[in-house]
Structures are given as structure tokens and as C-alpha cells.
Image (cartoon, rainbow, N blue to C red):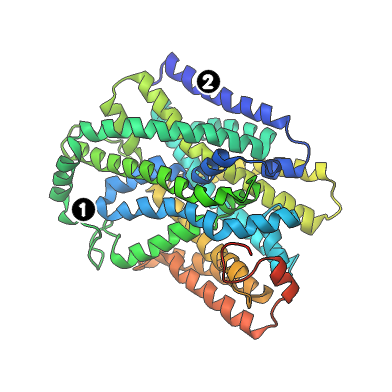
Amino acid sequence: MSDLITIGIIALYGIMLIGIGGWASKKIHNTEDYILAGRSLGFWVFTILMVASVCSGMTLVGVSGFGYASGWPGIWEQLFVPLAASFAIIVFGAKLHAVSKKTGYMTVEDYLAHRYESPKTVRGLAAVSGIVVSLIYLVGQYTAISLVLVWLFNIPHTTALIISAVIITVYTVIGGMYAVSWTTLIQGMILIVGVIIMAPLVIISAGGLTHINEVLASIDPNMVQPFYPTPVYASYAFCTPEFLFSFGILLIVGLACAPHVVNNILAAKDTKFFKWSPLIAFGIYAVVMFLVKFTGFAVRTLVEEGKLVLPATVNTQDFAFMYGIEYAMPNMMIWAIFAVIVLAAVMSTTDRLMLTIGTLFSWDVYRNLLKPTAPDREVLLVSQVCVVIAAAVSLFLAINPPEMLAWLIWMGIGVMLATFAVPLLAALYWRRANGAGAIASMIAGLIGSGIFGYYHKFVAPLPVHFSLIALTLAALAMIVFSLMTPKNSEDVLDATLTGPYIQPK
């Protein structure tokens, strides 16, 4: 469907991002500049970065696809995901930011290593786990980007992956966190404005919400209910009350403790941002999420009435938003602008994930475990090389897309939840938690998510998301092993602001 105007708009967008990377590279003088943008992010850059780090290929491609497949019972996602950004800022933000300003932490793994008095084991396990789960999540982002480029240019899936990877990798490698934060600000504004303008047009083209609800009810009366009944009677009817309970924990807590989200806190310029940023981040993202989900409903209506046909692929519902825009606004220039909006949504998370992987390896593994004497310039180079490697590995894994993008994204978040939530929350709020408990918790969460995730996918469906069971195992491991072994020193607990309070004293 592409023409010269479309190619020109997309090319201009890619050149702009690379240009920002070039500008940002001039501001990088050391590893701290590359990883944390010199801890200089202002209020709006930080707030939009938090929103965009939570936002992903799931927001436009996955959320609309989820709405298309399951209807209203999945609407809770529109509250859970925006709450993740607020949860991260409130529950993790004030303490981590205050400690990092005194200690110079570069990553959350620095905090965990200090808090649990385990500079090798806890740091290494947290870093390796973070790299693994970030790669899983990154595969979903590249899949989403590919869907857009395949739709827009009618090119092979693999070609689309390579094009997107080259653009993102170039500006992330050369510009680091400065490039990621400023491109994210621009991408975030494009996403917000674009969805607010375009989503209502698709909803109107399908006859409005009243008509949409009538059509959904004709497919399945439960599609217009707040949840599906138990037991699950169809592949799309999995949003039962028990699943939604686990779904809320998965999205709110799992996303909040994801390395690529929580590490943003260390880059904020001022702790005062944490007063209003949670509310603003939630409000902005909630509006976007609801509009995208309603668009998924609208496209399902258009398909059921024979007005629109989605491609016959295993992940057909993930094309819902794109084909809805194509139907509501049959203008190729509009399609190109919309493609930029979708790419902005996905790239804003993809670049952050790539930088996170590079940071975890270069700083936590290479600099702190393998070669403590490595000079700053060498650590910076290792980080840049790791970004390239992360792009290559995730591209290879994304060649065969899943049946529904949402499932892949949820899997990545589930592993994050099971692995990081308990050690991080316990580190900040439970003074009895110690290194033995943290190690046992991360191992139990990582192994448990693998076992129960496999069981759910290939043996028999679980009534809840697999991560809830793995999270429970992680919490039990933390409690048992912490109580069986000596607690950390009081000096460390005080220095790391450990205790049942949110605002540092």
C-alpha cells in the first residue's frame, strides 16, 4: 500500500530519531551520562518516559487485538497498566531516588547488592534474570514493529524486523539514555495526540459504542459483561474473576518492577517529581488505553458485519487497529502518519529495553563481576556492543510471531513479576529480608515461572496467570530463607532506607 509520500514520512521519522541520537551523543562524557542521562531528566521528560516504558507494542497492537478477541471482560487492563507507572513511582520512586543520590547507584541492581550485602551473587542473579526477561519482552516489541511495517509496505516479516532494528539500534547505541529519553518524549506526544484523534473516528465508523455493544452481545452475551464465568468455555473467555485477580497483580506490580521501568527512577532530576508524576502518568495513559481497547471492539463489529476483513494469519486480531484506521480513513497519507504513531508507541519501549540489557551486562556483570578495574570508556563500549547483540538476538527470536502478541508480552511481564517483585519490595519495606532470602526468591520465581508457564501453555490451562503461582513460591522462599539465616546489619538497613514507609524520613 506504500507510495512515495508514505515512504518519505516514515524515512523522515527514522532520520529524525537518528538525528536525536547524534545530538545526544555529544552530551555523553561518561558511563553515568550514557546509562542515566546524567541524572538530569526534567519533570515532563521523566513522566512521559515512565508512561512510554510501560507503554509498548501491547498498547496499540496488543490492546486492540485483546479487545477484538475478548470484548469487555478485558477492560480491566485499561486500569491495571496505567497503575503500573504510578505504582513504580510511588512505591519504588521516593526511596530509590533518595538513596541513589547519596550513593551514586547506576542501576537497581546496585541497590539490591548493597541492601542484601551480596555484591556478587544477588547482583549477578538479578542482572542475568533482568537480561533474560528483557529479551523475552523485547521479542514482543519487535514483533509489533514488524506487524506495522508489513501492513504498510507489504514487505516480508524478516525484512521489516531488520529495518526497525537498524533504526532503533543506531540512535540507542550512539545516544544512550539521553537519546532514549528525548526520542521517547517526542514519541509519547505523537502517540497521545494520534490516538486521541484517530481512535474516535474508528469507533464512529463502526456505529458508536451502543451499536458496538449490541454486535458484541450477539457474538457472545458475556462479551459485554465485566468478566467471563468460570470455568473457561472458549479460548477467548479466559478473563474469569480468578484470572483477573492474577492479571491485576501481573500488570500493576510486574510492570512496575521491570528493570527497564524501575531504573528510570534513578535518572530523574528531582525527588519532587514523585508528587504529581504518578497522577499525571496514570491519567494520560488511561485515556490512551481505553480508546485503543474501544477501537478493538469497533473493528470486531466491522468484521462481524462484513465491512472489513483482517488478514488470514495466526495473529489476525493484532492487525485490528491498523485495519480499523485504514477503513475509517482511506487516505494513504493518514495511514503513514498512523504508522508513525504505532512505531512511536513500540519504539519508545524497545529502545529502553535494549539500553537496559546493555546496562545490566556492561555495568552489573562486566564492570562489577568480571572486570572491576575496567575503565569507564571500556564499560561504555561494552554497553554499546551489548545493545547491538540484544537487537540481533531478539530479532532472531521474533522471526516466528506468536498467535496473539498480548500473550508474549504477558509472559515477559510474568517472569519479571515472579523474579523481581519480592526481592525489591522486601528490600525496601521488610527489615528482616536478607541476601539468602533474595537469592532463594529470585531462583524460585525464575524456575517457577518457567515450570508453570510451560504447564499452562503445553499441558493444561491454569485458572490464574502462571506468574501468580511463581510469585507465591518466590514470596515463600524469601520468608523461609530470611528467617532461617541472620539478618542484614542495621547500618545497611538504615542506609538503604529499609522499613514500612514510603516517604524517606
Name which residue type carries label 1: Met
Which residue is found at the position 69% from the left and 67% from the top? 115
Is residue 174 shown above or below 433?
above
The residue to which callout 2 is attached is 12
**Which of the 4 image quarters holds residue 420?**
bottom right
> x%, y% of residue 87?
49, 57
> x%, y% of residue 386?
69, 44
Q: Which mark is residue 258?
A: none
> x%, y% of residue 131?
62, 54
Q: Earlier in the sequence, mark 2 or mark 1?
A: 2
Name which residue type carries label 2: Leu
- Closer-to-camera residue (463/114): 114
Element carrying mark 2: helix
**Which of the 4 image quarters holds residue 291?**
top left
- Closer-to-camera residue (438/81): 81
Question: Residues at badges 2 and 1 in contact (C-beta under 8 Å)?
Answer: no
Element carrying mark 1: helix
Q: Residue furthest bottom?
A: 484
> x%, y% of residue 473?
51, 74
Is residue 488 shown above or below 305?
below
Q: CA distance from mark 2 to mark 1?
A: 41 Å
Q: Which quarter of the image is occupied by the N terminus?
A: top left
Q: Is residue 73 left or right of residue 280?
A: left
Q: Mark 2 Cα within 10 Å, few/some/many (few <14, many 20+)? A: few
**Which of the 4 image quarters holds residue 235?**
bottom left
Which residue is found at the position 45% from the left and 42% from the top? 57
The residue to which callout 1 is attached is 223
